Image (cartoon, rainbow, N blue to C red):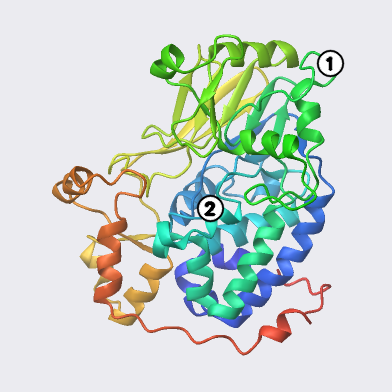
């Protein structure tokens, strides 16, 4: 209950979001959602109508846009299913809030809300504080709750991520995944094909890094699902293997790309028509490739160097129809944008600082600032990262003390239903 109330009006719940009660609620919610996910197969099967969402990346504002315009009466009263393709954390400033809300929805509606795993739902990525800084998930956990409790919550949430499904199939026709199609590790024409391979991935998989019990070939399947990308036209010409349709990804680290042949083979072998995936930022929110057979959905408009006019998108699959839903750059909701000085006039510096830390006040860089940022060669981080970090320093943040409630996290009654 506290978490859903927070999502409805996060600015009114700033003390709660920084409290030990929020940490306890996350701990309890994690244990319950983990049990739900353990009962799901590595590839879930569902029927349309279904809304498909791409990367969220800690962007509570865009998640609120979808809530206000798609399930404004609540998910339970909205027809259809909800499929999220992963990457809920890192880059944005509201990672904990996004995870808490989506976990609460999964717990409330386990057969209606489906949370797939992305590459940022792995410890190697969301624990990479050296790269993402204040935008990394582990940093936000520890900054909010202190080093000890923050690390414990970060690890507990990752244990829940370990149990997330890797793929979904809608109407036995549309394959949904975070990154892309996995390479076959057995006869792809045998019964089940690649879907069988995904279903055989360990029920608890660390992936990056793997647990000792994970077999190498199934770690490859899982890694391909969360890391791969469609090959660019240049890659199709120069690096994609003509026989397999796969090649090395520009991301490095063993990631792959898949070309036209790989897509054709996979769809034919499985009897599917389309692939829906996330993993790549697009200013339009949705992009189409590989002969209009691969759809890329991106559901955050910030933090990916796509400019001030970037849109957040999702796709409604309604039997034989598909409809794109985008957030216009002109859309405004309850969130305050930094250049809107009138909205800030009644807030103290302390209140402004707290809201910036929680992502409730967002930075809108000017065109000149954005062009300078791009000229400096920033590609991997968001448009406003450098700009916002300067704001953090200017506010002279106070460090949060470790919570004194560490032991109590492990003694919370699991039957408490105040999530």
The secondary element bearing badge 1 is classed as loop
Mark 2 / mark 1, whichever is N-terminal: 2
Q: Residues within 10 Å of mark 2 (few under 14, many from 20)?
A: some
User: Is residue 310 at least partly visible in the picture?
Assistant: yes
Secondary structure, mark 2, is helix
Q: Is residue 89 above or below residue 21?
A: above
From the top left corner, tell me how far across and down residue 324 is, in percent: 50, 28
Q: Which mark is residue 125?
A: 2
Residue under pointer 1: 190
Q: Residue at x 71, y 19 (%)?
A: 173
Quadrant where the C terminus sits is: bottom right
Q: Position of residue 142 (x, y in %)?
A: 52, 74
- Asked whether the viewer can see residue 334, the reply is no
Picture disc at residue 260: none
Q: In terms of depth relative to the viewer, which is nearer, 166 or 80? A: 166
Q: Quadrant of the N terminus?
A: bottom right
Q: How many marks?
A: 2
180, 223: nearer the viewer: 223
Q: Residue at x 17, y 46 (%)?
A: 367
- Residue at 59% x, 67% y is 5
Residue 43: x and y, percent? 76, 35
- Observer-nearest of 210 and 195: 210
């Amino acid at each position: 209950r506290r978490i859903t109330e927070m999502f409805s009006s996060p600015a009114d719940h700033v003390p709660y979001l920084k409290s030990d009660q929020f940490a306890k609620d996350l701990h309890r919610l994690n244990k319950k959602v983990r049990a739900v996910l353990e009962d799901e197969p590595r590839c879930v099967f569902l029927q349309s109508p279904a809304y498909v969402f791409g990367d969220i990346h800690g962007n509570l504002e865009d998640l609120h846009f979808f809530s206000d315009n798609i399930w404004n009466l609540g998910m339970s009263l909205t027809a259809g299913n909800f499929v999220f393709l992963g990457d809920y954390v890192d880059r944005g400033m509201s990672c904990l809030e996004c995870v808490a809300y989506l976990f609460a929805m999964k717990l409330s509606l386990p057969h209606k809300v489906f949370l797939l795993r992305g590459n940022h739902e792995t410890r190697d990525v969301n624990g990479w504080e050296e790269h993402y800084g204040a935008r990394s998930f582990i940093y936000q956990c520890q900054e909010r709750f202190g080093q000890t409790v923050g690390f414990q919550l970060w690890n507990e949430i990752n244990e829940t991520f370990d149990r997330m499904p890797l793929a979904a199939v809608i109407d036995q026709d549309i394959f949904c995944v975070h990154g892309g199609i996995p390479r076959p590790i057995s006869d792809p024409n045998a019964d089940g094909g690649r879907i069988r391979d995904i279903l055989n991935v360990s029920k608890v998989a660390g992936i990056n890094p793997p647990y000792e019990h994970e077999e190498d070939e199934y770690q490859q399947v899982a890694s391909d699902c969360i890391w791969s990308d469609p090959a660019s036209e240049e890659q199709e010409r120069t690096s994609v293997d003509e026989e397999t349709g796969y090649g090395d990804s520009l991301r490095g680290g063993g990631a792959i790309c898949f070309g036209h042949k790989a897509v054709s083979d996979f769809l034919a072998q499985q009897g599917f028509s389309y692939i829906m995936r996330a993993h790549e930022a697009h200013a339009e929110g949705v992009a189409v490739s590989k002969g209009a057979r691969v759809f890329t959905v991106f559901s955050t408009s910030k933090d990916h160097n796509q400019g001030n006019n970037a849109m957040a998108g999702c796709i409604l699959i309604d039997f034989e129809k598909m409809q794109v839903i985008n957030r216009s750059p002109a859309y405004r909701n309850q969130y305050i944008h930094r250049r809107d000085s009138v909205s800030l006039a009644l807030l103290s510096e302390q209140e402004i600082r707290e809201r910036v830390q929680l992502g409730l006040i967002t930075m809108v860089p000017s065109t000149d600032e954005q062009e300078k940022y791009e000229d400096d060669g920033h590609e991997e981080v968001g448009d406003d990262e450098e700009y916002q970090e300067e704001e953090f320093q200017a506010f002279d943040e106070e460090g949060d003390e470790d919570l004194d409630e560490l032991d109590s996290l492990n003694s919370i009654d699991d039957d408490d239903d105040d999530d």
